């Protein structure tokens, strides 16, 4: 092609380049926003203001129990352990236990835990990765104990 036959870069060409570039950016942003909204697991509480009104009192009551929790997975059995200040096992009343991922609710499940005399156990089939347990238990005196525990399953 000779110099006289070279095409000139015009304003129309620049417009096409700009529209194409911004079109790609906007498409990617809309796709990411759609996926983020579609996989969001939801709210922790229905009304955060109301929940905040009793937060300090509830936290102090829960800390007064002196409980610690631990979770482990052994051969497809999930072990949930509550211990008191002296390190002794506690048999709490499990009000709710949800096992799931932090990124979506698709894998959420409520395993059927049973008391073994030392801990609560439930059979589970979990894929590898990070898992969360969100539990609400109750002490004998009626104090609610809320805990979220994160654990990793090797895949």
Image: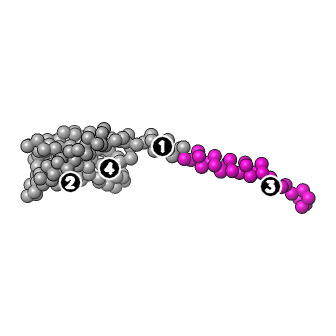
Label 1 and label 2: CA atoms lie apart by 33 Å
Magenta segment range?
A: 1-29
Which circle, 1 or 2, is nearer the viewer? Answer: 1
Residue 44 inside the magenta-drawn segment = no
What residue is pinned by disc 2? 70
Which quarter of the figure is the N terminus placed in?
Answer: bottom right
Quarter holding residue 95: top left
- Magenta highlight: main SS: helix
Question: Residue under circle 3?
Answer: 9
- Disc 3 is placed on an element classified as loop
Task: Give whichever of discs 1 and 2 has the lower sequence position.
Answer: 1
The numbered mark, 1 or 3, whose residue comes first in the sequence reads 3
Task: Kindly report the distance in space between the C-alpha atoms of the residues bearing marks 4 and 2.
Answer: 14 Å
Q: Count residues near mark 4 (Cα–Cα under 10 Å), then give few for <14, some for 14-19, many for 20+.
A: many
Percent of width and height locating residue 116: 13, 46
Please report whichever mark, 2 or 3, sits nearer to the chain's N-terminal start: 3
Provide the secondary structure element on which disc 1 rests: helix
Mark-to-mark CA distance, 4 and 3 = 55 Å
Q: Earlier in the sequence, mark 4 or mark 3?
A: 3
Q: Does residue 34 sit above or below 149 in this rendering? A: above
Secondary structure under tag 2 reads strand
């Amino acid at each position: 092609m000779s110099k006289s036959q070279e095409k000139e870069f015009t304003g129309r060409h620049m417009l096409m380049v700009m529209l194409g570039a911004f079109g790609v950016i906007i498409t990617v942003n809309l796709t990411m926003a759609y996926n983020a909204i579609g996989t969001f697991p939801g709210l922790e509480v229905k009304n955060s203001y109301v929940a905040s009104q009793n937060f300090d009192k509830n936290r102090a009551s829960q800390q007064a129990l002196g409980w610690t929790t631990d979770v482990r997975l052994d051969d497809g059995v999930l072990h949930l352990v509550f211990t008191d200040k002296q390190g002794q096992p506690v048999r709490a009343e499990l009000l709710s236990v949800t096992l799931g991922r932090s990124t979506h609710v698709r894998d959420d499940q409520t395993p059927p835990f049973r008391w073994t005399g030392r801990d609560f156990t439930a059979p589970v089939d979990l894929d590898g990765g990070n898992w969360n347990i969100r539990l609400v238990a109750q002490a004998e005196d009626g104090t609610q104990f809320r805990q979220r525990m994160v654990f990793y399953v090797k895949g």
